Image (spheres, helix red, strand yellow):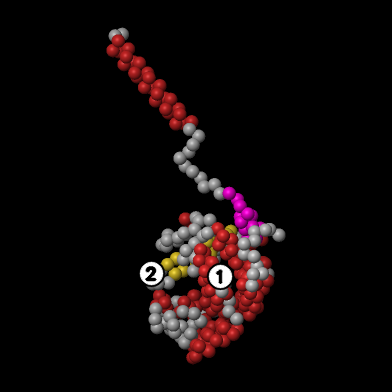
Amino acid sequence: MDMKKQYLKYVLILSAAIFLASCKEDGLDPTSVITVDSREYNEFDEWLEANYMEPYNIEFKYRYEMNETNYNYYTIPAEYKFAVQMAHLVKYLCIDTYDEVAGITFTRSYFPKLFVLMGEWEYLNNGTYILGTAEGGKKIILTGINWLPTYIRTADNLNEYYIKTIHHEFTHILNQNVDYPKDFAMVTADSYLADSWSSEPYKSSHLKRGFITDYAQESDTEDFAEMLSTFVTHDAAWWDSQLLLAGDGAASISAKLDIVKAYMQDAFGINLERVRDVVLRRQNDVMTGLVDLNDLTID
């Protein structure tokens, strides 16, 4: 064999060796390009396990998960400290309220099994935004969590932006289990507005038109949920003031409230006046500082 052939043979052998070594190294590399999100189980997770999962089988998701979001909106994570406070508020003002009024069996049976927190509201192109949604009777998404420090300063704002929303969405879930009477929709049957409720003159004239809130004008389904959630988060004096402002619309509002009360009593054995009393008492506990919204100790 001449020197040229020997040199070529050496180059081929060396190249093959380098190639095999390279393949061998790549095959044994323990570092994967695919990473798995590893989450440290913290004291908040332990608190949620003890206060949501174990007694009610309710999952409370405060970490951001893209597949839990609505892709039609820009969403951001809820901040940890505000998620802790919201978990206390949902538990104390909503779950514990129905435990006290209707018993834990009712709460276990009907309360949604999944809460998902989002840091920002879901903004619509008509100038409004979504405070929360209920999906399939199993899940409630609460938005705007990062605004909690702004709206927790007064009971009215806390209710308007968060607590009433939870009672509203829970009403939808109850309606999915037991439908409300058709008579409810007939009270103001010709007055529902779909998307026009957020525009004037309708937005500011809802009371005179027979609706307790402007959003109640959207549909009879939303009207029912607004009637119940607004009633249980406001005292009798406030309600009477709204009826006074409503003028001729007061008759329609009162007629619908009677149907809502009868529905809760007949379908679930729940006195709605009692629910309101408990919500307002617990709300006062929160506003006067009797409830530590940051406490993660487990009893």
* Residue 266 in view here: no
Q: Which mark is residue 71?
A: none
Q: Decide if residue 117 is in sight here.
A: yes
Residue 104: image quadrant is bottom right
User: Which amino acid is tagged 2?
Assistant: Asn
Question: What residue did someone put label 2 on?
Answer: 125
Horizontal placement of 169 versus 288: left or right? left
Q: Which residues are magenta?
A: 40-54
- Distance from label 2 to label 1 (Cα)? 27 Å
Report x, y in % for residue 43.
Answer: 63, 54
Q: Which residue is mark 1?
A: 152
Residue 293 lies, in percent from the top left, at 62, 64
In the image, is residue 232 part of the stretch drawn in magenta?
Answer: no
The residue lying at 47 percent from left, 87 percent from top is: 208
Q: Secondary structure at mark 2?
A: loop
Image quadrant holding the N terminus, namely top left
Q: Position of residue 296 (x, y in %)?
A: 64, 59
The image quadrant that residue 193 belongs to is: bottom left
Q: Main secondary structure of the magenta part?
A: helix
Rendered position, 15 above or below 72: above
Amino acid at the residue labelled 1: Ile
Q: Is residue 270 left or right of residue 246?
A: right
Give the residue at x 60% y 50%: 41
Instruction: Give neighbour class at mark 1: few <14, some 14-19, many 20+ (Cα, 10 Å).
Output: some
- So how many labels did they put on this image? 2
